[in-house]
């Protein structure tokens, strides 16, 4: 479902701030893979997601989704295939619009805008049932402006909007990092339910190694813009945080000391 072939990305080339963020990155996700992504600061995690989403062009390599080469596609054209939830709960929704209006926009992802973008009664019933499944009481607040919601409520709504049209690829960029532990656990539970139910191919960045091990069927670790660890299935299920740290030290070598405390 996703193929990343020899991707390179350098920021500020030829200057003292030059940064090689991705160095020949390769990754192949199969349909339905729920892959958690970990790595230290500067490992290339967010750069990889932004490259896939088309936030900036890559210097070299190819990005292919479901057999379609999207490497040269602008960000808005890729959005037809990709759903995304950001770390900041304020992103991904329109704060000044009502809950039902945000859902109406999300339901028309990839369609040409027209005059019939309002929310009808039939659609309201569908939205109400979808919100009810979140278990947050939002089904009774559909005319509330999204800017009045808590961070957790807003992130749950963003997750619902990002997955409403069943994207070919779901990108989760530390989408629980800004939430308190209880709310983060609720959003992760909702994530697991939606991804499993709709069999969504998913990349989820997290700094929490326990979450990386607990969720998904596959785990990859990035370091210096490359995948250095890739475990899946039964091998992943049997791992502990200590096992993962030891694997990281072995793969990263001399650079492991500075990142070990962060990852732990």
Image (spheres, rainbow, N blue to C red):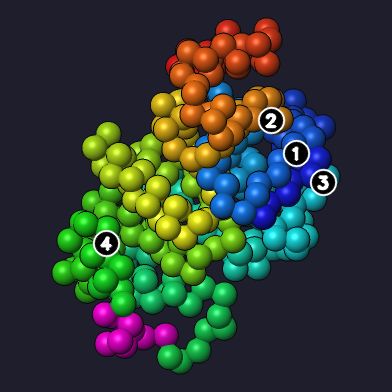
Between 13 and 246, the one nearer to me in the picture: 246
Question: To which residue does mark 4 refer?
Answer: 133
Mark 1 Cα shell of 10 Å, populated few (<14), some (14-19), many (≥20): some
At a point 61% along the width and 30% down the height, the residue shown is 231
- Whichever of labels 1 and 3 marks the residue nearer the N terminus, that label is 1
Q: Which mark is residue 227?
A: 2
Whether residue 261 sits left or right of residue 201 in the image: it is left
Mark 4 Cα shell of 10 Å, populated few (<14), some (14-19), many (≥20): few
CA separation in Å, label 1 and label 2: 7 Å
- Residue 179 lies in what quarter of the image? top left
Q: State if disc 2 and disc 1 touch (CB < 8 Å).
A: yes
The magenta stretch spans which residues?
117-125
Q: Which mark is residue 26?
A: 1
Whether residue 157 sits left or right of residue 232 in the image: it is left
Q: Which mark is residue 61?
A: 3
Q: Which mark is residue 195?
A: none
At a point 50% along the width and 22% down the height, the residue shown is 239
């Amino acid at each position: 479902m996703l193929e990343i072939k020899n991707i390179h990305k350098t920021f500020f080339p030829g200057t003292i701030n030059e940064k090689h963020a991705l160095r020949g990155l390769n990754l192949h996700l199969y349909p339905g893979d729920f892959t958690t992504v970990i790595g230290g600061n500067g490992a290339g995690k967010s750069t990889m997601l932004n490259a896939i989403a088309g936030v900036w062009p890559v210097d070299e390599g190819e990005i292919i989704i479901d057999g379609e080469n999207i490497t040269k596609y602008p960000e808005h054209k890729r959005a037809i295939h990709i759903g995304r939830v950001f770390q900041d709960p304020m992103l991904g929704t329109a704060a000044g619009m009502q809950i039902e209006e945000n859902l109406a926009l999300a339901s028309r992802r990839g369609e040409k805008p027209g005059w019939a973008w309002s929310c009808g009664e039939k659609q309201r019933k569908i939205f109400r049932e979808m919100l009810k499944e979140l278990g947050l009481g939002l089904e009774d607040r559909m005319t509330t402006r999204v800017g009045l919601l808590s961070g957790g409520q807003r992130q749950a709504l963003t997750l619902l909007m990002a997955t409403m049209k069943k994207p070919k690829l779901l990108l989760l960029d530390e989408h629980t990092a800004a939430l308190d532990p209880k709310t983060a656990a609720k959003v992760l539970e909702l994530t697991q339910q939606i991804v499993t139910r709709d069999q969504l191919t998913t990349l989820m960045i997290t700094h929490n190694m326990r979450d990386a091990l607990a969720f998904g069927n596959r785990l990859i670790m990035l370091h210096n813009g490359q995948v250095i660890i890739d475990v899946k299935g039964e091998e992943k299920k049997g791992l502990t945080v200590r096992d993962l740290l030891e694997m990281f030290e072995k793969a990263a070598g001399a650079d492991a000391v500075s990142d070990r405390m962060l990852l732990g």
